[in-house]
Amino acid sequence: MWIYEKKLQYPVRVSTCDPGLAKLLIEQYGGADGELAAALRYLNQRYTIPDKVIGLLNDIGTEEFAHLEMIATMVYKLTKDATPEQLKAHGLAPHFVNHGMDLHFHNAAGHPFTATYFQAKGDPIANLYEDIAAEEKARATYQWLIDLTDDEDLKDSLRFLREREIIHSQRFREAVEILKEEKEKKKYY
């Protein structure tokens, strides 16, 4: 059972209407290296991961949903005052025609979300390396988004998300070492 507290993990403030940046931010909503792909990847992998690190996948997977909510809030705030002409000028007309102002899981280019964005190999260490790569790609994407905006309020939230990607990558690296160490231990029966 979930208890919903209507509060974001970190505050999202936006200074100006910017549909162009909103279009780019959608990459982190439904793109290959976005928050939805990460959440589903980690929550799926937890069924075959050794007990020593299962909590890590569960914790980070659920946190990714909190990040997805932050991205949705950013996109909403960046577009809520946009006119249809502004949406059209920034390449969001197809999205607007199909979904109105609702978000939809697709990347910045408009390609729909697909489960092929992530892998599940069945090997815990291989999966964790996939997770490390996913976090590093998301970190890079957040940095590029930061570089593309002059909105200091928005940069603050994007920096928070970038830093969380770094922490997640570090935790996954630690999990790899835990599993390697466990694998090398002698087993006594």
Image (spheres, rainbow, N blue to C red):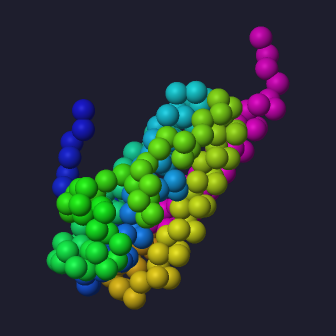
Q: What's the residue at 40%, 79% (across, down)?
A: 155
Quadrant of residue 69 in the image? Answer: bottom left
Is residue 34 in the magenta section? Answer: no
Q: Where is residue 150 in the image (x, y as percent from the top left)?
A: 40, 88
For the residue pair 52 and 63, the one nearer the viewer reads as 63
Q: What's the residue at 64%, 46% (across, down)?
A: 130
Q: Position of residue 153 (x, y in %)?
A: 33, 82
For the residue pair 70 and 55, the one nearer the viewer reads as 70
| Range shown magenta | 161-189
Q: Where is residue 74 in the image (x, y as percent from the top left)?
A: 30, 69
User: Horizontal placement of 180 versus 130: left or right?
Assistant: right
User: Horizontal placement of 75 versus 165: left or right?
Assistant: left
User: Horizontal placement of 156 versus 80: left or right?
Assistant: right
- Give the number of marks: 0
For the residue pair 81 and 154, the one nearer the viewer reads as 81
Q: What's the residue at 26%, 84% (across, down)?
A: 16
Residue 54 in view of the camera: yes
For the residue pair 31 and 182, the one nearer the viewer reads as 31
User: Horizontal placement of 13 versus 170: left or right?
Assistant: left
Is residue 180 in the magenta section? Answer: yes
Quadrant of residue 90 in the image? Answer: bottom left
The quarter of the rendered structure image containing the C terminus is top right
The quarter of the rendered structure image containing the N terminus is top left
